[in-house]
Image (cartoon, rainbow, N blue to C red):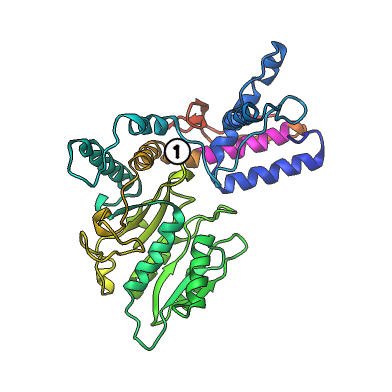
Amino acid sequence: MPDMSSTDSKQSWLSIGTAVLGGTMAGAFLQWAHSQRHRSSNAECGKPRSCGVGSELSTLHDAKNNTNNSDGRGRKPIYLDWNATTPIFAEVTDAMMPYTKEFFGNPSSKSYFSKPCQMTVQQARDNVATMVGCNPSEIIFTSCGTESDNTAIHLALKACTASSENVPHIVTSATEHPAIEECLLELSLQGRVTVTRVPVDGSGVVSVDDVRAAITTDTVLVTIMHSNNEVGSINPIAAIGALCAAQHVLFHTDAAQSCGKVPVDVAQLRVDMATIVGHKFGAPKGVAALYVRDGCLAEHGRKLPSLYGTSGGFLMGGGQESGRRAGTENVLLIAALGAACKVRSAHCCRNGIYSLCFLETVARFICVSSNRTHVLRTGKNCRTDTLCGYTCNDQSESPAEST
């Protein structure tokens, strides 16, 4: 951990704070900042204090390697990169446990043991749908964000209305995740699509006008990420969605970095398809979902397949997910995703306030270290919270000044 007494270290911490805020990881830093209040008192009694998720992971690492993984001063590293992955929420772990021992039935069969698993899969589907504001029938469970992104592209190609002599055209941005970029690159090398990559501005945001200019009569899909995984910029998805609807072009957004962190309503965003990734907001790795708006493919000459019909994605087989994605459902991980969505549906509305609190914490921390005056501007009264370190009262208060 850098020494805050040096100017370079202060600038380093500011850069880290800006990056983490951009990725909506306010809670992780707030947990750490809150723990600093108790550092001196704990040091006096000789008891090191846990610093949240980073400390737990370090403890696990030490147990496995029998080493003291610290910075040389007895301090544990703090995990802030919640854009890469997140710790599993306690509520999610609890929701998974029954499916490691008691409930093991195949949800696709009709036996007595299958019923609890069928109900769990349906409840999870309901929870995902509630979080993003859609019908449960519009949610397809997948194994990861990459599968969801790839499936969205292939569904669009199967739904294309481009004339047979023209190659289908896809519009995307220059800063998409490799799950989109590599798939499009491979398809273009095979001669199956042409791709236009619109640029982003200095803040990493796509221009609606650039997307409008890129659409042609052969465009079958526009795919633009909601929030960037590197810098946290949020694209004008609702405006792009309205444009695509007017142009009768399918629109997909990779919402892996925004779902569960900021409110996402697929109807308000006017998207036809959206990628949702569980391990970005408290579920384990290996489970995700793809939202596909009912009727969107029929509008482009193709319907989602019926049960045991031709697969709508890559995986053809037993007809799971109403024939849209074959393969026995992973009840354990689907239950986890549903539980994470339930947690985030209850708390996600406060994330904007968490981000403000995070910015205040960074600014206050740096200004105190440099003996500068700082004015508190969140307008909220914060107190400790078990979910992300802080929570805020709903009632606004007058800005307070501190020195």
For the stretch drawn in magenta, the main secondary structure is helix
Which residue lies under the disc numbered 1? Answer: 350
Identify which residue is drawn at 60% across, 44% down.
20
In this rendering, the answer to whether 223 lies above or below 216 is above
Residue 341 percent coordinates (x, y): 37, 41
User: Left or right: where does residue 314 sit relative to residue 117?
Assistant: right
Residue 99 percent coordinates (x, y): 33, 34
In this rendering, the answer to whether 347 lies above or below 201 is above
Identify which residue is drawn at 38% across, 82% down.
217
In this rendering, the answer to whether 191 lies above or below 111 is below
Give the quarter of the figure containing the N terminus. Answer: top right
In this rendering, the answer to whether 235 lies above or below 329 is below
Name the quadrant containing residue 307: bottom left
Q: Is residue 400 visible?
A: no
Of the pair 90 and 371, the residue shown nearer to us = 90
Residue 259 percent coordinates (x, y): 43, 48
Name the quadrant containing residue 51: top right
User: Left or right: where does residue 247 sit relative to residue 119?
Assistant: right
Question: Can you name the residue that lies furthest to the top here?
Answer: 45
